[in-house]
Image (cartoon, rainbow, N blue to C red):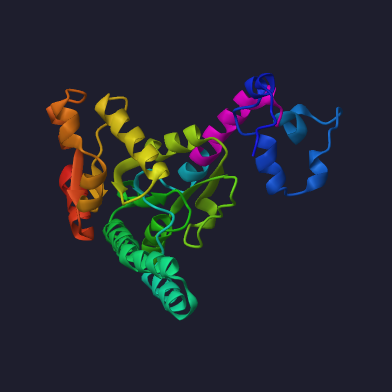
Amino acid sequence: MENTQTLPNLLIEQRMADAWADVLKYPADETVLHPNAHRLAFADPEFLLRRETRGMRIQLEMLKPDLGQSMQGIDHTVVVFGSARFCSPEAAQAMLDDAEQVGTPQAIANAQRQVRNARHYDQARLFARLVAAHSAQQPPDKRLFICTGGGPGIMEAANRGAQELGAPTVGLNIALPHEQNANPYVTPSLSFKFHYFALRKMHFMMRAKALVAFPGGFGTLDELFEVITLVQTKKSQPVPIVLFGSDYWKRLINIDAMVEEGVISPEDIDLLHYVDDPQDAWDVIAKFYLL
C-alpha cells in the first residue's frame, strides 16, 4: 500500500508515545479529563498530561513505585526476565491437544514448540520458590523478593512460584499498544504500571540484588544488556547476572567473538553465569552474597 504521508508530515510526526493515549485506555473517571481552568494545577489531569509537563510525569513515575515499595518493606529484589510468550506446561499441552484435533501442520508445530518451551515456565516457578523459601527464614531487612515485568509467561511463572509460598511479589508492568495486564500472582499493592520504559528499567535496578534472565525476545535482551552495561561501566554495584538456559544464550550471543574482536575485555565474561537448573541459579546468588 502506498504511503500517503508527505515527507514534511513524517518529519514532524511525534516519536514519543502520547501519555494521553495510555490514560484514555484506562480512565478511572472520564469526567475528570475534561479541561477546567479553575481546577488546582496539581489536581488537573488534563494539565498534567500536556507535552510540556512530561518532566513532571517522569518525576512522578520515578517516585510512586519507589514510595510504594519502601512503605511495604521491599528493599532487596531478585529480578526475573524472560519471554512473555511461554506458557505453563498445562496450557501448552492443552494447546497441542487442540492443534492435533483440528489444527494445521503449522499450528501443530507451534504447539509442539510451546510444549518444549514450557519447561522454562516450570523452572522459573521453581527458582522463585527457592528465593521465597530462603527469604521466609530471614529478618525483614534481609529478605529478597521476586520482581518481574508483571506480565505473562516467564514473569507470571516467577511471580507464581513466590506467591505459592506466601511471599509478596512485585510487578513492574508497562502500558503497550496491545493491552498487557498484570498477571494474577503479582501482589496487588505492588503492581505498578509504567508509561516510560526508561523509568521502568531504572526501577528494576534500584533494588536488584541479582538478575536472572530466561530465554526471551527483544524486551528481555533490552533489559539484560541494560543491566550488563550498568555493571560493566560501574554505574551500578556488581550483582550476579544469571543466564538461565545455556544452550539458548550461547546460540544467541557469541560473547567469545566479542572478546576476540576486542569490543569487550576478557574479564567481562565473568559478569555472566550460565545455568540450566533452578538450584544452580540460586547457588550463584547465594555464593555471591555468602548466604
In the shown orientation, is residue 202 left or right of residue 15?
Answer: left
Q: How many marks?
A: 0
User: What x and y, as percent, mark residue 275?
Assistant: 19, 52
Q: Position of residue 122 (x, y in %)?
A: 32, 65
Magenta-colored segment: predominant secondary structure: helix
Residue name at image x 40 percent, y 68 percent:
111
User: Is 197 rendered above or below residue 248?
Assistant: above
- Up-down: is 84 above or below 100? above
Q: Is residue 52 magenta?
A: yes
Q: Is residue 226 visible?
A: yes
Q: Quadrant of the N terminus?
A: top right
Q: Which residues are magenta?
A: 49-66
Q: Residue at x 80, y 42 (%)?
A: 32
Q: Position of residue 104 (x, y in %)?
A: 46, 71
Q: Estimate the x, y position of residue 116 in percent, counting from the top left.
A: 31, 66
- Residue 70, magenta (yes or no): no
Residue 15 versus residue 198: which sits nearer the camera?
15
Q: Considering depth in this image, is 209 or 138 the residue closer to the camera?
A: 209
Q: Name the quadrant containing residue 37.
A: top right
Q: Left or right: 28 with respect to 11? A: right
Q: Quadrant of residue 59?
A: top right
**Between residues 44 and 255, which one lies in front from this camera angle?**
255
Q: In the drawing, does residue 84 fall left or right of residue 250? A: right
Q: Is residue 165 visible?
A: no
